[in-house]
Image (spheres, rainbow, N blue to C red):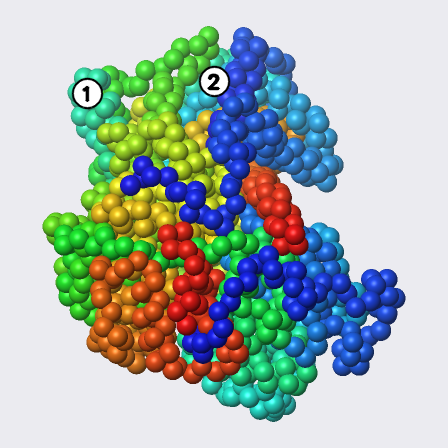
Amino acid sequence: MSTAPPASGASGPAPAPGAPERQAPRGPRSAIDWGRVGLGLAAPLLAIVAALVITSLIFLSTGDDPFRAFAVMADYGVKSDSQIVIVNKAVPYFLSALAVAIGFRMNLFNIGVDGQYRIAAFFAAAVGGALALPGIVQIPVIMIVAMMVGAVWAGIAGLLKTTRGVSEVISTIMLNAIAAAVIGYFLQDGRLAVRDGNIIHTEPIPESAHFFEIPTGQAPVNGFLVVAVVVGVLYWFLLNRTRFGFDLRTVGRSESAAHAGGVGVGRMVVTSMLLSGAVAGLVGMPTLLGESYNYGTDFPAGIGFTGIAIALLGRNHPVGMALGALLWGFLERTGGRLEFEGYAQEIVGVMQGVIVLCVVVAYELVRRYGLRTQQRKVGERLAAEARNNGKTEKAEVSA
Amino acid sequence: MLYPRPPGPMIASGPTDLARSPSRPVSRPAPFPRGECAIKASSSSSRADRAPAGAPAVELHGITKRFPGVVANHDIDITVHRGTVHALVGENGAGKSTLMKILYGMQKPDEGTITVDGEQVSFAGPGDAIARGIGMVHQHFMLADNLTVLENVVLGAEKRHGIAGRARARIREISDAYGLAVRPDVLVEELGVADRQRVEILKVLYRGARTLILDEPTAVLVPQEVDALFDNLRELKAEGLTVIFISHKLGEVLSVADDITVIRRGTTVGAVKPDGVTRKELAELMVGSELPSPETRESTVTEVPALTVEGLSLTATDPDGVVRTVLDGVTFTIHQGEVLGIAGVEGNGQAELVEAVMGMRTPDGGTVVLDGEDITTAPTRRRRENGIGYIPEDRHRHGLLLEAPLWENRILGHVTEPPNSRRGLLDIKSARADTRRIVQEYDVRTPGIEVTAASLSGGNQQKLIVGREMSHHPKLLIAAHPTRGVDVGAQAQIWDQIRTARREGLAVLLISADLDELIGLSDTLRVMFRGRLVADADPAAITPEELGSAMTGAAGGHLGTDAPATPPMSQAPPAPGVPAARAASGAGAGAAPAASPEGPAAATDDPAGAPAPGPAAPGNRREGDA
Amino acid sequence: MRRVTKIAAAGMASAALILTTAACGESSTESGGKEKGVGLAFDVGGRDDHSFNESAARGVDKAKDELGVEAKLMTAKNNETEADREQRLSSLAEAGYNPVIGVGFSYGKSIEKVAKQFPDTTFGVVDSVSEGKNVDSMVFSEHEGSYLAGVAAALKSKSGKVGFIGGVNNALIQKFEAGFVQGAKDTKKDIEVVPEYLYPNNDKGFNDPGAAKAKAKGMLDRGIDVIYTAAGQSGAGSIEAVAAKKGAWAIGVDSDQYQQPGLAKYKDAILTSVVKNVDVAVFDLIKSVKDGKPLTGVNAYTLKEDGVSLATSGGFIDDLRKEIDAAKEKIAGGEITVDEQPKR
């Protein structure tokens, strides 16, 4: 059926579309569209400039010299040991952002990454401390336990959404609190933990299960960086190159169109929550397998929320989020230095907030601008065509 | 919508005669030069009542608007005289609504002038337009369901007459003066569509409008309601008010308008008087060339059932918990090469039927069999893979990803099928190539396949959807309002594609509000009312009037039996025989012929369905019969 | 759009990479000076937490006045990681501050690590036992002080119900709970002691006065009329709530909270405070370094040597002096052993 192109003879009232349109589809792909590249760069640049201006104003309002502050940050941030710290900080942030982004891509707001990674890391640590297998087996076992626990924890929210219509925002916030309580219950001397001075933590995992490190001249880089990069690539591939990813993005763009297009929206919600939770399960792994080797009361919290900010910052794109995670690490690393230099350390929190806000606003502005220009372009094209046709027809009428 | 007209003389003149003929003034120039208007533009806004009788109520000159996505307005000239009903006609997407938004202050023109009561004005927003006595009744009503009529009317105009007794008295007064029969204390949710429309009109009058813009007011009404509306409009006119009436339904326009301005592709192409023009001339002026026809010519219906639906029933729960039956024992069969048209006033279960067949809703009972395979419980994706193509009613919600590029839209709904993917992985290269093919073959006018679907005009979006669905060689095509909001050119193409595919054995389930489209394309017609198929009809033997009255639940069983024994369509000779039967029964139906001063055309108001020489059967068929 | 973002991102990534390689080799720890004075890193809540950090700060202030040393004070943020704490301590050590003191047990691990990197600097950690020959571990017998608070609470309560609010349910705060409960029960057999925590395992419990206020209100509504709060800065919230109810008493912690200007409005409701003489310990350490005989190893500050004590400001427990002194004697004499962990 499709073999028969619409007979142009039948479309009488539509004046022959004319040659330009026939060729049109080839147009924009023949060369680099500099206008669009510029548009793509505009948002991050706009955001960075705006963030710098706003933080400068804040510095000035407190009577500090913003340029000296930026210089301190830049100077300290590029030091080699700072770079190692920044990369090590960025790894869990990036994983957390990926977990959040999976939800974002289908319009699910998984606020619960925080609870998911903590409960996942806790049980993984408990299992890891109880087993003594060869490292090559034990490390995957620990990671799989973490991913499964994270997936289950997130999956609860997914199921609640599809079966009971509970907003995932509410349920994941609740699950964060429940996760904290569950950990608090089991993280007691005599339950799943041991006491070590004022800190209570799980049994340390055996040395064989410590993750490899990438040696540098000084402090090592956490080997989990490799896992993070792999997960980032998988994320990109899954979303952009597979049917599943297309379905997922379709739901994110228009649930109604996805439904009509044959995507089981409910199943998709549960599946993507499971995936998001599984990735969230990995967030605690760089710390557990490469740093603390146990889950204790001092295990870092709040990375799940940082992930939300970074996912926003990186527009759910793996490269964007990687840069965002590094930027976050940079700000935190240099923020400590700012305090040392006599600035209020809260300024870093302000900067982070301002950057996220600026990025969100800038992307939205640029997106709207882009859409408008595109519509105008298409509209003008068709209008010009209509005008030409109109002239000929008017001529006919008055002939 | 539907006005059978008494037989009249045969019209032979073509569109080119129209403009030349001195008896049909193509009036455009303003009554006095521009500068003069500007000088007079100093008095207060209340001059509406005192303005010299000669000054037109509204005058638009040289209006140009570059507007994204759809056809822009350019060089628009319109003069609307006080105390008249002025119709603005043009096909869908010609720029009528944009123009009215400009007049109502919702859009600013890029060029050109607006003159109200001889005074040049510039509107910053609807508020300015209202202050100048211009009011608008939108196509989609803007009423709060959970408020009373009174509350809706005074909402935002509390300062005029308060919100209680005085306002109620004023509403009664207006209602009586123009025969609107509006009851101020009824909840809007209890009102029918026609009543709501009258409330909207009253709302505008309450705000002091002297010039009313009605945007496609009849689109939502059944024929009887249209008559009532027109009576209201005549009352308004008699009271010295001015009505600007936007429509693409020529019969209506000819029956109610005093002046007609035709817009085509964004510009005014003529100003005519209704008594000096025929429907056909008007239609051709509107479209600019010979009209397309939805009529199928020879039957291709086979004996092989493609889709069998039996006893399909569905209930839905309202937000307030009431369980409602939306589909009740729906049973039908569509054969290969058959187009089954379902007529019905919107909201009688057609949308639900489509969704049940698509698998988007789970029916409570009944079976759906596609090409011998029971798909009652199959998920939507399986049904699509098994050969159901779907042109959804609301393409923005169900057919497109507006912010995604065209090639991703090409994948939508068919992600599991070639050329879009192979073994779970997307095949982006093939999908892009195939998108380019669709763009070309289906004449989707776009600068490229990377633009977002949102930037295309409605017609081009629809062409893309049709191209996509047809590209997967469906066994069954579900076409819900396939040409709604689509320009005439695209409409003709879409009809053509449906016809071509039908010839090759495609079964089509057609839902449409356009009765001419239904009658013209369908091989079999069923009427749906309150979730049940209440009547069936032979499209060759039924008139839109009969169909319209069946749609209101007034008739059941087999329709059109009083017509002369017309042979079934499958055996009918091409074209000429069909309109004969139609015209005959149309005359017999006698449904309120109201004011139909001229025009022999039998049934249609829609330009699309307007009588026209189809490529296969040239000649003025319907007129010729009369 | 996505394609474009990709190009932009790739550009930025490569720029970042160039930056990385260019800067390689130079480490931030390669600079530094000598003998700058005391470097002190607070736990969350900061210097003005009216409690634990403030007590440490008093020690530093005293050292400034009496020993003429300079001091640099830094503060922890919520949700910190080990790396952040290490960075803070090493930046102090590397800048030449000596001693470098971490206030709070969360510095326990990081002190151990950083102390190894700076063998010539003396480190001090409060509330934690850390290994290292250049580390002074200052630990306090909070449970013993809390026992006395329990005695006072039991005697003052009219309703026979007293409450305990812990900031975070960790081993340290459990010491406070255990002592308090034991002291109360030993004084009055039938007294009801309600222990509750703000957070199971989040340091936020030490600077969330809102949560403490809500928790205290709940307790008051249940008829509890003496509330002992061990929650750092959060304690101010609990004291505020108690002050609003007539006849109810708050027991403060770490510093003599009656004396604190920030809490002056509520001081008439502050029965007493379990004072942890962190200032004494901090001062001792600074002095020892200044004198060239740095303290190292575990230094316990118990009730016996007035490392912990019960404040008497306001005179609200003057009538109980007899019973309190008796209890104190029994503990000091070893007659009573106070539990470090609550019996559950």
Task: State left or right for residue A206 relative to residue B488.
Answer: left
Q: Residue at x 58, y 82 (%)?
A: B234
Name the residue carrying label 1.
A137
Q: Position of residue B25 (x, y in %)?
A: 68, 67
For the point 14% across and 63% down, the residue is B310
Task: State which tag comes first along the sequence, 1 or 2.
Answer: 2
Question: Residue A164, image x and y in percent?
Answer: 27, 58
The amino acid pointed to by label 2 is Ile
- Quarter of the view holding residue B241: bottom right
Q: Chain of mark 2?
A: A
Q: Secondary structure at mark 1?
A: helix
Q: CA distance from mark 1 to mark 2?
A: 28 Å
Q: Is residue B446 above or below residue B626?
A: above
Residue A138 appearing in the image: yes
Is C212 placed above or below A44 here?
A: below
Say which quarter of the image contains residue A371: top right
Image quadrant in which the C terminus of chain B is located: bottom left
C36 sits to left or right of B459: right
Q: Residue at x 62, y 16 (%)?
A: C35
State the mark number for residue A84: 2
Relative to C55, residue C225 above or below: below
Residue B238: x %, y % from top left: 64, 85
Q: Amino acid at mark 1?
A: Val
- Image quadrant containing the N terminus of chain B: bottom left
Q: Residue at x 58, y 91 (%)?
A: B176
